[in-house]
Amino acid sequence: DQQVKQNSPSLSVQEGRISILNCDYTNSMFDYFLWYKKYPAEGPTFLISISSIKDKNEDGRFTVFLNKSAKHLSLHIVPSQPGDSAVYFCAASAKDYKLSFGAGTTVTVRA
Amino acid sequence: DVKVTQSSRYLVKRTGEKVFLECVQDMDHENMFWYRQDPGLGLRLIYFSYDVKMKEKGDIPEGYSVSREKKERFSLILESASTNQTSMYLCASTQGYSEQFFGPGTRLTVL
């Protein structure tokens, strides 16, 4: 039973435009959320995180929004660049050391 | 800079063989994890360890065991490899309640 869901397996966006990736979760005990980026044949790299006490966190071109009542978070990438083409994983934690991951969304940035 | 290394990038084994996957981290992290990544399923936790000689089962521990004799090293063991264990295996480490750092992954093929 997957507690973290990324319902869009893929996303195609034009270079310079905004990419919006969505993630839903079911476990109300989750209080820490992360986004990872993964290139083929490499391990995931940490991108950005947000604690449940916040509803927004920004780092350069990347912004994560958290809507606790809807159990939904999203990642905005503005502007999208060709190097952003990768698989993005949403992950969540419930005050323990474990992370629950979504299935991933493959982003393709078109020139 | 945290570095997590894995002993092999690619591995091909036969059904029934015993397989060892090694992971080493150089940041004195207490917590270490083994995941497998499969298309459409994201990352699934196999085992984790929060201290030397301590281990906890993750979501899919069947067919696997682990060993942590030293703080920096966490080994995943497939006692008798089967074709359904063909996957990308990812090791990660973290200190406390924060983002996990991943190794480059081992692509294991069981024939």
Image: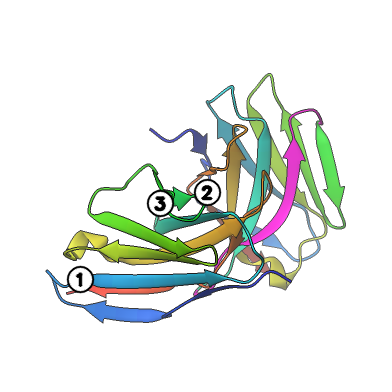
Q: Amino acid at mark 1?
A: Lys
In the image, taking residue A52 as reference, residue B53 lies left or right, namely: left
Which mark identifies residue A27?
none
Residue A78, position in %: x, y?
A: 82, 55
Give me the disc on residue B40: 3
In space, the residues marked 2 and 3 are separated at their CA atoms by 28 Å
In the image, what residue type sits under mark 3?
Gly
Q: Is residue A15 left or right of residue A44?
A: right
Q: Amino acid at mark 2?
A: Tyr
Q: Are marks 2 and 3 on the same chain?
A: yes
Per the image, label 1 sits on a secondary structure element best described as loop
Q: Which residue is mark 2?
A: B50
Residue B18 image label: 1
Q: Horizontally, is B107 left or right of B6 in the view?
A: left
Which structural element holds mark 2? loop
Look at the image and say whether residue A52 sits in the magenta stretch: yes
- For the residues marked 2 and 1, what is the alpha-carbon distance in whole angstroms? 25 Å
Residue A89 image point, x, y percent: 57, 52
Residue B10 position, x and y percent, is: 37, 81
Disc 2 or disc 1, which is closer to the eye?
Answer: 2
- Residue A76 inside the magenta-drawn segment: no
Q: Which residues are magenta?
A: A41-54
User: Based on the displayed image, in which of its 4 quarters is residue B25 positioned?
Assistant: bottom right
- Residue at horizontal 27 percent and vertical 73 percent from the top: B109
Labels 2 and 1 within one chain: yes
Give the residue drawn at x 73%, y 46%.
A49
